[in-house]
Image: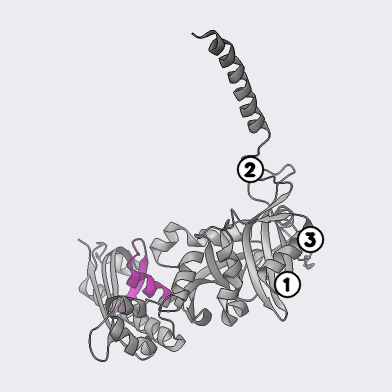
Amino acid sequence: MNPILKRTVPKFALFLGGILLFAFFSNDFGLIDIQKAAIILAAGIDKTPSGYELTAQISVPKGGETAGGTASVELSGRGETVADCLMMMYADSGWVPKFDFCSLVLLGEETAREGAMPALNYFLHNEYMSDDCAVAVCEGSAADVLKQTSSIDDTSSLAIGKLFSGAAEKSGATVKNTLRKFAVDTLGVSKSSFMPYIRTLALEQDNPSEGGKEAPGGGAGESSADKSEKSSQQESVLFRAEETALFAEGKMTGLLSAEETFAYNLLMGGVSAGSLTVRGENGLPVSLSIKRDRGKVTLSNDALPQAQLEIGLKVLVNDRTAEDFMAGTETNVATPEDERCAEELIASHAASLWETCRKSGCDLFLLSRDLWRSDPKRHAGLKDSIPSAVEAKIVVRVRGAK
Protein backbone atom coordinates (compact mmCIF):
# COMPACT_ATOMS: atom_id res chain seq x y z
CA MET A 1 0.00 0.00 0.00
CA ASN A 2 1.12 3.55 -0.68
CA PRO A 3 2.82 4.93 2.50
CA ILE A 4 0.78 8.14 2.28
CA LEU A 5 -2.52 6.19 2.17
CA LYS A 6 -1.28 3.95 4.96
CA ARG A 7 -0.98 7.00 7.24
CA THR A 8 -4.10 8.82 5.97
CA VAL A 9 -6.71 6.05 6.11
CA PRO A 10 -6.63 5.53 9.93
CA LYS A 11 -6.84 9.29 10.53
CA PHE A 12 -9.77 9.59 8.12
CA ALA A 13 -11.54 6.65 9.79
CA LEU A 14 -11.12 8.25 13.21
CA PHE A 15 -12.40 11.59 11.88
CA LEU A 16 -15.46 9.94 10.28
CA GLY A 17 -16.17 7.96 13.44
CA GLY A 18 -16.06 11.16 15.48
CA ILE A 19 -18.60 12.83 13.19
CA LEU A 20 -20.94 9.83 13.44
CA LEU A 21 -20.70 9.75 17.23
CA PHE A 22 -21.38 13.49 17.43
CA ALA A 23 -24.44 13.16 15.19
CA PHE A 24 -25.75 10.20 17.20
CA PHE A 25 -25.50 11.80 20.63
CA SER A 26 -26.65 15.29 19.58
CA ASN A 27 -29.90 14.36 17.75
CA ASP A 28 -33.26 13.25 19.14
CA PHE A 29 -34.18 11.51 15.84
CA GLY A 30 -37.73 12.90 15.94
CA LEU A 31 -38.47 11.57 19.44
CA ILE A 32 -40.96 13.61 21.44
CA ASP A 33 -40.03 14.94 24.86
CA ILE A 34 -43.10 14.05 26.92
CA GLN A 35 -42.18 16.67 29.50
CA LYS A 36 -42.44 19.48 26.95
CA ALA A 37 -44.96 18.19 24.37
CA ALA A 38 -48.68 17.54 24.67
CA ILE A 39 -49.59 14.25 22.96
CA ILE A 40 -53.18 14.88 21.88
CA LEU A 41 -55.36 11.75 21.77
CA ALA A 42 -58.57 13.51 20.75
CA ALA A 43 -59.83 16.99 19.94
CA GLY A 44 -63.33 18.27 20.65
CA ILE A 45 -64.67 21.37 18.88
CA ASP A 46 -67.62 23.47 20.06
CA LYS A 47 -69.04 26.67 18.57
CA THR A 48 -69.03 29.81 20.68
CA PRO A 49 -70.43 33.30 19.97
CA SER A 50 -66.91 34.58 19.27
CA GLY A 51 -65.55 31.57 17.41
CA TYR A 52 -64.62 28.12 18.69
CA GLU A 53 -63.71 26.31 21.86
CA LEU A 54 -61.17 23.50 21.43
CA THR A 55 -60.92 20.81 24.08
CA ALA A 56 -57.87 18.56 23.76
CA GLN A 57 -57.57 15.26 25.58
CA ILE A 58 -53.86 14.91 26.25
CA SER A 59 -51.92 11.82 27.26
CA VAL A 60 -49.63 12.39 30.23
CA PRO A 61 -47.14 10.17 32.09
CA LYS A 62 -49.01 8.06 34.63
CA GLY A 63 -47.38 8.02 38.04
CA GLY A 64 -48.24 6.48 41.37
CA GLU A 65 -48.68 2.88 42.37
CA THR A 66 -51.40 2.16 39.81
CA ALA A 67 -50.10 0.46 36.67
CA GLY A 68 -51.71 0.00 33.27
CA GLY A 69 -54.32 2.04 31.45
CA THR A 70 -53.91 5.49 29.95
CA ALA A 71 -53.76 8.71 31.92
CA SER A 72 -55.04 11.88 30.32
CA VAL A 73 -55.89 15.46 31.05
CA GLU A 74 -58.34 17.78 29.28
CA LEU A 75 -57.24 21.29 28.34
CA SER A 76 -59.34 23.88 26.57
CA GLY A 77 -58.80 27.13 24.74
CA ARG A 78 -61.00 29.67 22.96
CA GLY A 79 -60.41 31.79 19.90
CA GLU A 80 -61.78 32.97 16.58
CA THR A 81 -60.21 29.97 14.83
CA VAL A 82 -59.05 26.53 15.92
CA ALA A 83 -55.43 27.69 15.52
CA ASP A 84 -56.13 30.55 17.96
CA CYS A 85 -57.50 28.00 20.44
CA LEU A 86 -54.29 25.98 20.25
CA MET A 87 -52.16 29.06 20.85
CA MET A 88 -54.28 29.89 23.89
CA MET A 89 -53.79 26.35 25.23
CA TYR A 90 -50.03 26.69 24.69
CA ALA A 91 -49.97 30.01 26.52
CA ASP A 92 -51.94 28.57 29.46
CA SER A 93 -50.05 25.28 29.86
CA GLY A 94 -46.64 25.68 28.22
CA TRP A 95 -47.15 22.38 26.37
CA VAL A 96 -46.57 22.26 22.63
CA PRO A 97 -49.60 20.52 21.04
CA LYS A 98 -48.68 17.45 18.95
CA PHE A 99 -51.28 15.85 16.65
CA ASP A 100 -49.16 12.88 15.57
CA PHE A 101 -51.25 10.47 17.67
CA CYS A 102 -54.64 12.17 17.50
CA SER A 103 -57.17 9.44 16.68
CA LEU A 104 -60.48 11.30 17.04
CA VAL A 105 -61.94 14.69 16.15
CA LEU A 106 -65.27 15.16 17.90
CA LEU A 107 -67.72 17.90 16.88
CA GLY A 108 -70.44 19.23 19.13
CA GLU A 109 -73.89 19.04 17.55
CA GLU A 110 -74.24 22.83 17.24
CA THR A 111 -70.85 23.02 15.50
CA ALA A 112 -71.88 20.28 13.07
CA ARG A 113 -75.18 21.96 12.22
CA GLU A 114 -73.56 25.36 11.60
CA GLY A 115 -70.82 23.88 9.40
CA ALA A 116 -68.21 21.18 9.92
CA MET A 117 -65.62 22.23 7.33
CA PRO A 118 -64.58 25.55 8.96
CA ALA A 119 -63.96 23.63 12.19
CA LEU A 120 -61.95 20.92 10.41
CA ASN A 121 -59.84 23.19 8.19
CA TYR A 122 -56.95 23.38 10.64
CA PHE A 123 -56.68 19.58 10.89
CA LEU A 124 -56.83 19.17 7.12
CA HIS A 125 -53.89 21.57 6.70
CA ASN A 126 -51.84 20.23 9.61
CA GLU A 127 -48.98 18.19 8.12
CA TYR A 128 -48.65 16.01 11.22
CA MET A 129 -52.35 15.11 11.44
CA SER A 130 -53.24 11.65 10.17
CA ASP A 131 -55.80 11.54 7.35
CA ASP A 132 -57.16 8.34 8.90
CA CYS A 133 -58.20 10.12 12.10
CA ALA A 134 -61.81 9.26 12.94
CA VAL A 135 -64.43 12.02 12.93
CA ALA A 136 -67.72 11.98 14.83
CA VAL A 137 -70.57 14.17 16.08
CA CYS A 138 -71.78 14.04 19.67
CA GLU A 139 -75.00 15.00 21.38
CA GLY A 140 -74.54 18.31 23.16
CA SER A 141 -71.05 19.63 23.83
CA ALA A 142 -67.87 17.88 22.72
CA ALA A 143 -66.05 19.26 25.77
CA ASP A 144 -68.56 17.62 28.12
CA VAL A 145 -68.24 14.27 26.35
CA LEU A 146 -64.42 14.22 26.50
CA LYS A 147 -64.50 15.03 30.21
CA GLN A 148 -66.77 12.08 31.00
CA THR A 149 -65.57 8.96 32.81
CA SER A 150 -66.47 5.86 30.82
CA SER A 151 -67.11 2.48 32.41
CA ILE A 152 -65.10 0.95 29.53
CA ASP A 153 -61.96 3.08 29.74
CA ASP A 154 -60.86 5.95 31.98
CA THR A 155 -59.93 7.92 28.85
CA SER A 156 -63.17 8.76 27.05
CA SER A 157 -61.63 9.05 23.56
CA LEU A 158 -60.28 5.49 23.79
CA ALA A 159 -63.68 4.24 24.90
CA ILE A 160 -65.29 5.95 21.90
CA GLY A 161 -62.61 4.56 19.59
CA LYS A 162 -63.60 1.02 20.59
CA LEU A 163 -67.04 1.67 19.04
CA PHE A 164 -65.38 1.89 15.60
CA SER A 165 -63.51 -1.40 15.76
CA GLY A 166 -63.46 -3.82 12.85
CA ALA A 167 -65.81 -6.17 14.68
CA ALA A 168 -68.34 -3.36 15.21
CA GLU A 169 -68.23 -2.46 11.50
CA LYS A 170 -68.79 -6.08 10.47
CA SER A 171 -71.84 -6.28 12.74
CA GLY A 172 -73.46 -3.37 10.88
CA ALA A 173 -74.34 -1.65 14.15
CA THR A 174 -72.23 1.45 13.55
CA VAL A 175 -70.41 3.39 10.84
CA LYS A 176 -66.95 4.91 10.73
CA ASN A 177 -65.67 7.88 8.77
CA THR A 178 -62.25 9.48 8.55
CA LEU A 179 -61.07 13.06 8.22
CA ARG A 180 -59.88 12.53 4.66
CA LYS A 181 -62.98 10.72 3.40
CA PHE A 182 -65.33 13.27 4.96
CA ALA A 183 -63.45 16.16 3.32
CA VAL A 184 -63.23 14.45 -0.09
CA ASP A 185 -66.95 13.60 -0.16
CA THR A 186 -68.06 16.99 1.16
CA LEU A 187 -65.92 18.96 -1.28
CA GLY A 188 -66.73 16.60 -4.17
CA VAL A 189 -69.58 16.54 -6.64
CA SER A 190 -72.18 15.10 -4.25
CA LYS A 191 -71.29 17.56 -1.44
CA SER A 192 -72.54 15.00 1.07
CA SER A 193 -71.06 12.80 3.76
CA PHE A 194 -71.76 11.33 7.20
CA MET A 195 -70.35 10.87 10.69
CA PRO A 196 -71.24 8.51 13.53
CA TYR A 197 -73.41 10.18 16.15
CA ILE A 198 -72.29 9.65 19.77
CA ARG A 199 -74.79 9.56 22.62
CA THR A 200 -73.90 9.36 26.32
CA LEU A 201 -75.85 7.00 28.58
CA ALA A 202 -75.49 7.45 32.32
CA LEU A 203 -75.01 4.42 34.54
CA GLU A 204 -76.36 4.68 38.06
CA GLN A 205 -73.91 3.60 40.76
CA ASP A 206 -74.73 2.88 44.37
CA ASN A 207 -72.17 4.15 46.86
CA PRO A 208 -73.31 3.56 50.46
CA SER A 209 -70.18 5.13 51.91
CA GLU A 210 -71.12 8.52 50.50
CA GLY A 211 -74.58 8.49 52.02
CA GLY A 212 -76.18 9.98 48.91
CA LYS A 213 -73.83 12.98 48.90
CA GLU A 214 -73.34 14.41 45.44
CA ALA A 215 -69.83 13.87 44.07
CA PRO A 216 -67.93 16.84 42.68
CA GLY A 217 -67.49 16.83 38.90
CA GLY A 218 -64.05 17.08 37.31
CA GLY A 219 -63.18 20.13 35.28
CA ALA A 220 -60.50 20.92 32.74
CA GLY A 221 -57.08 19.92 33.95
CA GLU A 222 -58.26 16.87 35.92
CA SER A 223 -56.43 13.74 34.79
CA SER A 224 -58.10 10.43 34.07
CA ALA A 225 -55.91 8.88 36.77
CA ASP A 226 -57.65 11.15 39.29
CA LYS A 227 -60.98 10.22 37.74
CA SER A 228 -60.20 6.55 38.23
CA GLU A 229 -59.48 7.13 41.93
CA LYS A 230 -62.80 8.96 42.29
CA SER A 231 -64.79 6.42 40.29
CA SER A 232 -66.82 5.54 43.38
CA GLN A 233 -67.91 9.17 43.65
CA GLN A 234 -68.58 9.91 39.98
CA GLU A 235 -71.19 8.69 37.61
CA SER A 236 -69.80 6.39 34.90
CA VAL A 237 -71.23 6.54 31.41
CA LEU A 238 -71.50 4.40 28.31
CA PHE A 239 -71.07 5.74 24.80
CA ARG A 240 -73.32 4.57 21.95
CA ALA A 241 -72.78 5.17 18.23
CA GLU A 242 -75.73 3.38 16.62
CA GLU A 243 -77.05 6.51 14.92
CA THR A 244 -75.53 8.38 11.96
CA ALA A 245 -75.38 12.13 11.31
CA LEU A 246 -76.03 13.15 7.69
CA PHE A 247 -74.25 16.12 6.10
CA ALA A 248 -75.13 18.18 3.04
CA GLU A 249 -72.77 20.94 1.90
CA GLY A 250 -70.81 20.51 5.12
CA LYS A 251 -73.75 21.00 7.49
CA MET A 252 -75.52 18.37 9.58
CA THR A 253 -79.03 18.12 8.13
CA GLY A 254 -80.38 14.78 9.33
CA LEU A 255 -79.96 11.81 11.62
CA LEU A 256 -80.32 8.12 10.79
CA SER A 257 -81.82 5.87 13.45
CA ALA A 258 -80.12 2.65 14.54
CA GLU A 259 -82.33 0.64 12.15
CA GLU A 260 -81.58 2.98 9.23
CA THR A 261 -77.85 2.81 10.00
CA PHE A 262 -78.07 -0.99 9.89
CA ALA A 263 -79.85 -0.81 6.53
CA TYR A 264 -77.13 1.53 5.21
CA ASN A 265 -74.43 -0.95 6.18
CA LEU A 266 -76.34 -3.76 4.47
CA LEU A 267 -76.57 -1.68 1.29
CA MET A 268 -72.83 -1.02 1.41
CA GLY A 269 -72.27 -4.78 1.56
CA GLY A 270 -69.92 -4.86 4.55
CA VAL A 271 -71.94 -6.87 7.08
CA SER A 272 -70.65 -10.36 7.78
CA ALA A 273 -71.24 -10.84 11.50
CA GLY A 274 -74.53 -9.04 12.15
CA SER A 275 -77.80 -10.38 13.45
CA LEU A 276 -81.45 -9.56 12.83
CA THR A 277 -84.51 -10.49 14.89
CA VAL A 278 -87.82 -11.00 13.10
CA ARG A 279 -91.25 -12.34 13.95
CA GLY A 280 -91.38 -15.82 12.44
CA GLU A 281 -94.08 -18.45 12.50
CA ASN A 282 -96.86 -17.81 15.02
CA GLY A 283 -95.38 -14.36 15.65
CA LEU A 284 -92.54 -15.74 17.78
CA PRO A 285 -89.13 -14.01 17.65
CA VAL A 286 -86.37 -15.58 15.57
CA SER A 287 -82.78 -14.23 15.50
CA LEU A 288 -81.00 -14.59 12.18
CA SER A 289 -77.22 -14.45 11.83
CA ILE A 290 -75.99 -12.79 8.62
CA LYS A 291 -73.30 -14.89 6.95
CA ARG A 292 -73.06 -13.07 3.61
CA ASP A 293 -74.17 -9.61 2.53
CA ARG A 294 -74.36 -8.30 -1.03
CA GLY A 295 -75.59 -4.72 -1.27
CA LYS A 296 -75.71 -2.25 -4.15
CA VAL A 297 -77.18 1.20 -4.84
CA THR A 298 -77.41 2.50 -8.42
CA LEU A 299 -79.32 5.10 -10.43
CA SER A 300 -81.52 3.91 -13.27
CA ASN A 301 -81.22 5.23 -16.83
CA ASP A 302 -84.87 6.31 -17.08
CA ALA A 303 -85.91 9.84 -17.95
CA LEU A 304 -87.15 10.12 -14.37
CA PRO A 305 -84.39 8.12 -12.67
CA GLN A 306 -84.98 5.82 -9.74
CA ALA A 307 -82.53 4.84 -7.04
CA GLN A 308 -82.27 1.06 -7.09
CA LEU A 309 -81.50 -0.30 -3.63
CA GLU A 310 -80.61 -4.00 -3.66
CA ILE A 311 -79.76 -6.25 -0.71
CA GLY A 312 -79.02 -9.97 -0.87
CA LEU A 313 -78.39 -11.93 2.34
CA LYS A 314 -77.48 -15.46 3.35
CA VAL A 315 -78.60 -16.17 6.92
CA LEU A 316 -78.69 -18.89 9.55
CA VAL A 317 -81.00 -19.14 12.54
CA ASN A 318 -79.06 -17.93 15.54
CA ASP A 319 -81.75 -18.31 18.21
CA ARG A 320 -85.39 -19.27 18.64
CA THR A 321 -87.82 -19.17 21.53
CA ALA A 322 -87.93 -22.11 23.95
CA GLU A 323 -91.35 -23.17 22.64
CA ASP A 324 -90.10 -23.48 19.07
CA PHE A 325 -87.00 -25.31 20.21
CA MET A 326 -88.99 -27.87 22.17
CA ALA A 327 -91.28 -28.35 19.19
CA GLY A 328 -88.36 -29.76 17.24
CA THR A 329 -87.44 -26.75 15.09
CA GLU A 330 -83.95 -26.45 16.57
CA THR A 331 -82.34 -26.58 13.11
CA ASN A 332 -80.37 -23.48 12.18
CA VAL A 333 -81.81 -23.34 8.65
CA ALA A 334 -84.23 -20.44 8.12
CA THR A 335 -87.76 -21.32 7.04
CA PRO A 336 -89.55 -19.59 4.12
CA GLU A 337 -91.59 -17.65 6.68
CA ASP A 338 -88.39 -16.46 8.40
CA GLU A 339 -87.03 -15.32 5.03
CA ARG A 340 -90.22 -13.47 4.11
CA CYS A 341 -90.40 -11.65 7.45
CA ALA A 342 -86.73 -10.65 7.20
CA GLU A 343 -87.23 -9.28 3.69
CA GLU A 344 -90.20 -7.16 4.80
CA LEU A 345 -88.38 -5.80 7.85
CA ILE A 346 -85.20 -4.89 5.96
CA ALA A 347 -87.18 -3.33 3.11
CA SER A 348 -89.03 -1.11 5.59
CA HIS A 349 -85.73 0.03 7.13
CA ALA A 350 -84.26 0.74 3.68
CA ALA A 351 -87.35 2.75 2.68
CA SER A 352 -87.11 4.79 5.88
CA LEU A 353 -83.39 5.35 5.23
CA TRP A 354 -84.02 6.69 1.73
CA GLU A 355 -86.80 8.98 2.94
CA THR A 356 -84.49 10.46 5.58
CA CYS A 357 -81.83 11.07 2.92
CA ARG A 358 -84.38 12.81 0.69
CA LYS A 359 -85.62 15.09 3.45
CA SER A 360 -82.11 16.00 4.58
CA GLY A 361 -80.79 16.53 1.03
CA CYS A 362 -77.85 14.22 1.75
CA ASP A 363 -76.62 12.18 -1.23
CA LEU A 364 -75.40 9.48 1.15
CA PHE A 365 -74.62 6.95 -1.59
CA LEU A 366 -72.81 9.54 -3.80
CA LEU A 367 -75.15 8.87 -6.74
CA SER A 368 -74.57 12.36 -8.13
CA ARG A 369 -70.82 11.75 -8.22
CA ASP A 370 -71.25 8.40 -9.99
CA LEU A 371 -73.59 9.96 -12.56
CA TRP A 372 -71.12 12.80 -13.18
CA ARG A 373 -68.35 10.29 -13.82
CA SER A 374 -70.40 8.20 -16.25
CA ASP A 375 -72.49 10.88 -18.04
CA PRO A 376 -71.58 14.53 -17.33
CA LYS A 377 -74.29 15.92 -19.64
CA ARG A 378 -77.06 13.96 -17.95
CA HIS A 379 -75.66 14.93 -14.58
CA ALA A 380 -75.97 18.64 -15.43
CA GLY A 381 -79.73 18.26 -15.80
CA LEU A 382 -80.30 16.05 -12.75
CA LYS A 383 -77.77 17.27 -10.19
CA ASP A 384 -80.30 19.47 -8.35
CA SER A 385 -82.85 16.65 -8.02
CA ILE A 386 -80.59 14.05 -6.38
CA PRO A 387 -81.68 12.76 -3.92
CA SER A 388 -84.65 15.00 -3.00
CA ALA A 389 -86.74 14.28 -6.13
CA VAL A 390 -85.65 10.68 -6.74
CA GLU A 391 -87.87 7.75 -5.79
CA ALA A 392 -86.41 4.45 -4.65
CA LYS A 393 -87.00 0.91 -5.87
CA ILE A 394 -86.08 -1.54 -3.12
CA VAL A 395 -85.28 -5.21 -3.73
CA VAL A 396 -84.40 -7.45 -0.78
CA ARG A 397 -83.61 -11.15 -1.07
CA VAL A 398 -83.01 -13.23 2.06
CA ARG A 399 -82.16 -16.90 1.75
CA GLY A 400 -81.19 -19.43 4.35
CA ALA A 401 -77.63 -20.72 4.09
CA LYS A 402 -77.39 -24.46 3.65
Residue marked by disc 2: 31
Residue pointed to by mark 1:
79
State which quadrant residue 127 falls in: bottom right
Residue drawn at (29%, 68%) of the image: 324
Question: Magenta stretch: residue 280 in it?
Answer: yes
The one nearer the camera, 141 or 286, is: 141
* Residue type (three-letter) at the residue carrying disc 2: Leu
Residue 281 placement: quadrant: bottom left
- Classify residue 268 as left or right of residue 38: left
Magenta segment includes 115: no
* Quadrant (top left, top right, bottom left, bottom right) of the C terminus: bottom left
Q: CA distance from mark 3 to mark 2?
A: 23 Å
**Pointer 1 with pointer 2, Cβ within 8 A:** no
Q: Position of residue 172 (x, y in %)?
A: 40, 67
Q: Nearer the viewer, residue 137 or 114?
A: 114
Identify the mark nearer the N-term, 1 or 2: 2
The disc at residue 91 is 3
Mark 3 or mark 1: name the one nearer the start of the chain: 1
Dot 3 alpha-carbon crowd within 10 angstroms: few under 14, some 14 to 19, many 20 or more = few
Q: Secondary structure at mark 2?
A: loop
The disc labelled 1 sits on which kind of residue? Gly
Image location of residue 394, percent across then percent down: 28, 82
Image coordinates of residue 265 in percent, x first then y, are 38, 70
Q: Is residue 294 left or right of residue 154?
A: left
Q: Are marks 3 and 2 in contact (CB under 8 Å)?
A: no
Placement of 265 over or under 23, stated as above or below = below
Residue range corresponding to the magenta coloring: 261-288
Q: Secondary structure at mark 3?
A: helix
Callout 1 secondary element? strand
- Number of marks in the image? 3
